[in-house]
Image: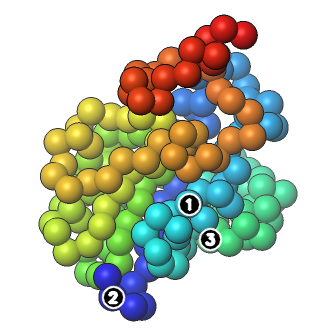
Amino acid sequence: MAGNRRTWVLVDGENIDATLGGSILGRRPQPDERPRWDRILSFVADSWNQDARGLFFLNASVNLPMSFVQALLALGYQPVPLSGDPDEKVVDLAIQRTLRALQDHGDDVVLVSHDGDFVDDLGVLADGSRRVGVLAFEEFRNAGFAQIPGIRFFDLEYDAGAFDAQLPRVRIIPIAEFDPEQFLR
C-alpha cells in the first residue's frame, strides 16, 4: 500500500456498548469488561502495517461525558460529539456521512460496529482500491456485511484482544483451536 496511506477507524461506541451489555453480558459492563480502545487502534495499525486514526462517534444530545472524552483524546482518538432531535440516530448519520466522504480519499477504513445501517456505504468503499474491514463481535455482526466482496472481518475479543476479562460468549470453535480445558473448569 502507499507509504502515506492510513486507516480510519470509525467507532460506533453506542452499538458496541449496547451489544456488550444487552446481548453478551445481560447487564451493564463492569470496568474490566469494557473494550480497551487503545488496543483497537494498535491492532488495526499492526494488522495493516500503517497509521490508524480513530474517530469515536458519541451521542451528546443530552450531555457530553467529559471524562470519557478526555480519555479518548489521551488514547489517540478524535471524539466526534453529536447532537440532534430525540428521534434522530445522530451517530449512525454521522458515520454514514463519514463513509461517504471517504469515497474521495484513498485511505483504508475499519468500522467498529455491528449495525446493518452501514452495509451499503461500506460496500461502496470495498471497490478494490482500499482495504475495508469490520471489527465487531462476530456472532452479532450484521449478515449484510458478509455479502461485501473483499471485506476483512476482525473479532473485538479474539483478534483485537480488546478486553481484560474473558467474555461469556458462545462461538463456533475451529477444531484446530479447540481446548477441552476451557470447558472443564
In this view, the mark in front (1 or 3): 1
Residue carrying label 2: 2
Q: Element under label 2?
A: loop
Residue carrying label 3: 78
Quote the CA–CA distance across marks 1 and 3: 17 Å
Who's the residue at 32% across and 53% down the image?
152
- Check the image and tell me how it is coloured: rainbow
User: Residue 43 got which mark?
Assistant: 1
In the image, what residue type sits under mark 1?
Answer: Phe
Quote the CA–CA distance across marks 2 and 1: 19 Å
Q: Element under label 1?
A: helix
Who's the residue at 53% across and 68% down the image?
46
The quadrant of the rendering that contains the C terminus is top right
Is residue 182 something that shows in the picture?
Answer: yes
Counting residues from the start of the chain, the first of labels 3 and 2 encountered is 2
Please determine whether, in this image, residue 91 is positioned above or below residue 24.
Answer: below
- In x, y percent, where is residue 160? 56, 50
In this view, the mark in front (3 or 2): 2
Quote the CA–CA distance across marks 3 and 2: 23 Å
Q: Element under label 3?
A: strand
- In x, y percent, where is residue 128? 16, 68
Counting residues from the start of the chain, the first of labels 2 and 1 encountered is 2
How would you rate the neighbour count of disc 1 (Cα within 10 Å): few for under 14, some for 14-19, many for 20 or more?
some
Q: Residue furthest bottom?
A: 3
> Front-most of 57 and 129?
129
